[in-house]
Image (cartoon, grey):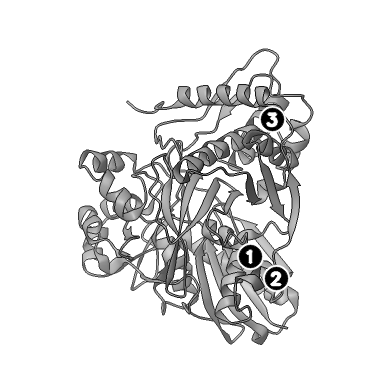
Amino acid sequence: MKYILAIDQGTTSNRVILFDKAGKIVNMLQKEFPQIYPHPDYVEHDPVEIYAQVYSLMTEVVAVSEIDPYNIIAIGIANQRETTVVWDKITGKPIYNAIVWQCRRTASICEQMKLDGLEDYIKENTGLVIDAYFSATKLKWILDNVSNAYEKALNNELMFGTIDTWLLWKLTKGRAFKTDYTNASRTMLYNIKDLCWDKKICDYFKIPMSMLPEVSDSSSLFGMVNLFNVDIPICAIIGDQQAALFGQTCFNVGDVKNTYGTGCFMLMNTGENKVTSKNGLITTIALGLNNKITYALEGSVFIGGAIIQWLRDELKFINASKDSEVDALRVKDNNGVYIVPAFTGLGAPHWDMYARGTVFGLTRGTNKYHFTRAALESIAYQTKDVLDAMCLDTNSKITSLRADGGASQNGFLMQFQADIIKGDVICPISLESTAMGVLFLALLYTKECLDFEDLKNIRKQGLIYSPKIDDEKRTHYLKKWAKAVQMCKGWEKE
């Protein structure tokens, strides 16, 4: 039997999944890691802890599965995107914590970029909007605020990477310094037209290009990992949301998936067509395969499933995330309560770095079940906003949505999502779409699967949720939501 190890490095946890080549999960281990909040708008991770945990999970999952490491034919990595690590080339130690994609500390840098007239250039060449979400301003902040960082960078002593590059460098003991097209396209430093690091943007930020990794196809040989004295190739690296798009077999132009994780991330395959959004979405690279680039439109919701974690950990309304479904169904509706979970600003299609979380419609009759229901509903509303923008940009009508991620297990949320978009929500049997995307790329590289039709046979469809509410009720809900969003914008702006 041949096996593939898939590393799913997420925002709140690391997961390592051992697949057999038929796509069956042999074993899976997962562990959460701490979130670091030095200031209200700061979010950080310890990159050393992330690597140590990933390596530990890799060895443990192989050991408990009692398989021969010689039968592991490939390792692949999917990772949280945009999160920024800078480390010393000589010592191998990070010079600062990883700055997470959710972090808002660089909003003022983004404002200066806009004043300097860079918006059109950034959109045209990177496909992105100017926002603290992306890696470039995080890297600049580290160079500007860590002692001697800029001098070391000029002396070619520092290396920059998103989490995939950091893990690859560590796993290969410093022999591989690479990333793939999908992760590069999320940095706001990469030109997705010319497929190269953009010198003009790097010069603007005073970022030495020697800090930047080599960019490769998502399915290619990145390096070798020694595991139990066996050299195993890392032959797949891809950003987690692009991995989920591929894992959901969205191989055709117009296919759409939404991942309900910490945030919500909707991607539409646009093929070789680099669609420029006029409605608040971004253009990104969906895949680099066989020297061919596939593009996607994407809408990113910063707080999706994270609002349920907030109910659990901060407000103590629920004991476990799964309790949210039961509690939401204890009441017939939200009793007029609307939550806009803009804890770290609003992402697509609004892009307001200064919006903050707000609750509207509280009365003496509001109870915690209404609050929980409104929290779940906010995930569906945000998804609907992105879907509407996607339809406008492509002049198309989207009648179905492929769903995955942890929150897609919530039956109430999936049904409400179908009600709000007035279309089917399709869930796979295996919710591990991100890891499945890594598996698919590894199978293609190792020639265990020869084409996309082989891959489609591996993915199995699960539940389908169809809309049930009437148009009048849907319209009422959406008008209230739109009003709530408008009222929360700009809260933190001076």
Give percent across and percent down for residue 179. Answer: 42, 68
Please, is residue 119 above or below residue 205 in the view? above
Q: Label 1 sits on what residue type?
A: Met
Secondary element under disc 1, as helix, strand or loop, is helix
Left or right of residue 401, residue 78 in this image: left
Residue at the spot of label 1: 436
Q: CA distance from mark 3 to mark 1?
A: 31 Å
Is residue 145 visible from the viewing direction of this image?
no
Quarter of the N terminus within the rendering? bottom right
| Residue 181 figure quarter | bottom left
| Residue 82 figure quarter | bottom left
Which one is earlier in the sequence, the residue at label 3 or at label 1? 3
Please, is residue 102 above or below residue 196 in the view? above
Give percent across and percent down for residue 168. Answer: 47, 72
User: What label sits on residue 302 in the rendered view?
Assistant: none
Residue at the spot of label 3: 373
Q: CA distance from mark 3 to mark 2?
A: 35 Å
Residue density around tag 1, few if under 14, some if 14–19, many if 20 or more, within 10 Å: many
User: What label sits on residue 23 in the rendered view?
Assistant: 2
